[in-house]
Amino acid sequence: MHAQDYRLSLVHHRLETEIGREQARKAPDRWRLMRLKKLKLAIKDRLHRLTGATG
């Protein structure tokens, strides 16, 4: 695993954690959740492109 892949994996994991925290709140901020999820998806897409994964 390259350094950039590793860093993106860490960011992806942190975003998953933040999404979970926000969803666990009594009144989750829908806009924040949307931004976090979009960013997580963008990181995931970039990881797939870097690793050459398909599908």
Image: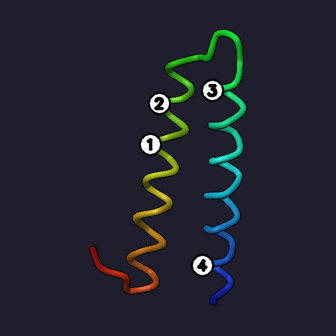
Q: Is residue 24 above or below residue 15?
A: above
The reply to whether the C-beta atoms of the residues labelled 1 and 2 are less than 8 Å apart is yes
Mark 2 or 4, nearer chain start:
4
Report the residue marked by disc 4. Answer: 5
**In the rendered image, the vertical position of residue 3 relative to residue 26, given as above or below:** below
Q: Which residue is mark 1?
A: 38
- Of the 4 image quadrants, the one containing the C terminus is bottom left
Asked whether, in this view, residue 54 is left or right of residue 31, the answer is left
Three-letter amino acid code of the residue under disc 2:
Met
What whole-number distance in Å separates the C-alpha atoms at marks 2 and 4? 24 Å
How crowded pointer 3 is (Cα within 10 Å; few <14, some 14-19, many 20+) is rated as some
Q: Position of residue 6 (x, y in %)?
A: 67, 77
* C-alpha distance separating marks 3 and 1: 15 Å
Q: Which residue is mark 3?
A: 23
Q: Secondary structure at mark 4?
A: helix
Label 2 and label 3: CA atoms lie apart by: 11 Å
In percent of the image, x 49 and y 41: which residue is there?
37
The CA distance from mark 1 to mark 4 is: 19 Å
Seen in the picture, residue 13 relative to 39 is either above or below; the reply is: below
